[in-house]
Amino acid sequence: MPLFRSIPLVRLALPFVAGLMLAMPTHAGPPAPKPAQGDNTLMLTVFFRHDQTKTLDEINAQLDRTGFRKTFPPEGVEVVSWYVMMGVGQVVTLRFPPEKLRAVNLAIEKGAWGAFRTEMYATYDYRPIWQEQRGTK
């Protein structure tokens, strides 16, 4: 029997559908201007990995209970990008002043835990360096 006949289609599609439904849009309009280097901001990429032991309704109920959609990101924190990665979850890159780091951490701990497993990585824009090294700047 082929593999796909032994796995219900709904089970295969659930992570994809959950990712689409949980996707939170960024802002409308053109992308935000990039601050000049040395602007004293940090960038942080956060992986919100879907808890696949829960249904979409359970995940949404958890996010509603914690108020995640209302408190994340905290005031003064810019969303640079917010993507859904099929099979992973949501990947959000934030830009903020260093003094906002604690607020970002607390918003994630209080709002996302229980619905997502989280991973965070310090981030920087490598594209200008890459372009300079290639001589295409």
Image (spheres, rainbow, N blue to C red):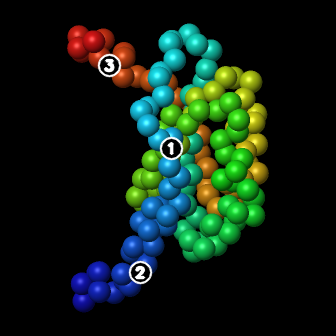
Q: On screen, 38 above or below 32? A: above
Give the residue type at disc 1: Thr
Residue at the spot of label 1: 26
- From the top left corner, tell me how far across and down residue 123 is, in percent: 52, 29
Q: On screen, 127 above or below 72? A: above
- From the top left corner, tell me how far across and down residue 132 is, in percent: 30, 11
* 66 left or right of 5 in image: right
Asked if one can make out residue 85 in the rendered structure from this viewpoint, the answer is: yes
* SS for callout 3: helix
Give the residue type at disc 2: Val
Give the residue type at disc 3: Trp
Residue for point 27% across, 12% down: 137
Label 1: how many Cα within 10 Å (few below 14, some 14–19, many 20+): some
Where residue 120 is drawn, which disc sits there? none
Asked if one can make out residue 121 in the rendered structure from this viewpoint, the answer is: no
Label 2: how many Cα within 10 Å (few below 14, some 14–19, many 20+): few
Residue at the spot of label 3: 130
Quick one: label 1 or label 3, which is nearer the N terminus?
Answer: 1
Residue at the spot of label 2: 10
Give the image quarter of residue 64.
bottom right
Label 3: how many Cα within 10 Å (few below 14, some 14–19, many 20+): few
Residue for point 43% across, 78% down: 11
The residues tagged by marks 2 and 3 sit, at their Cα atoms, a distance apart of 42 Å
* SS for callout 2: helix
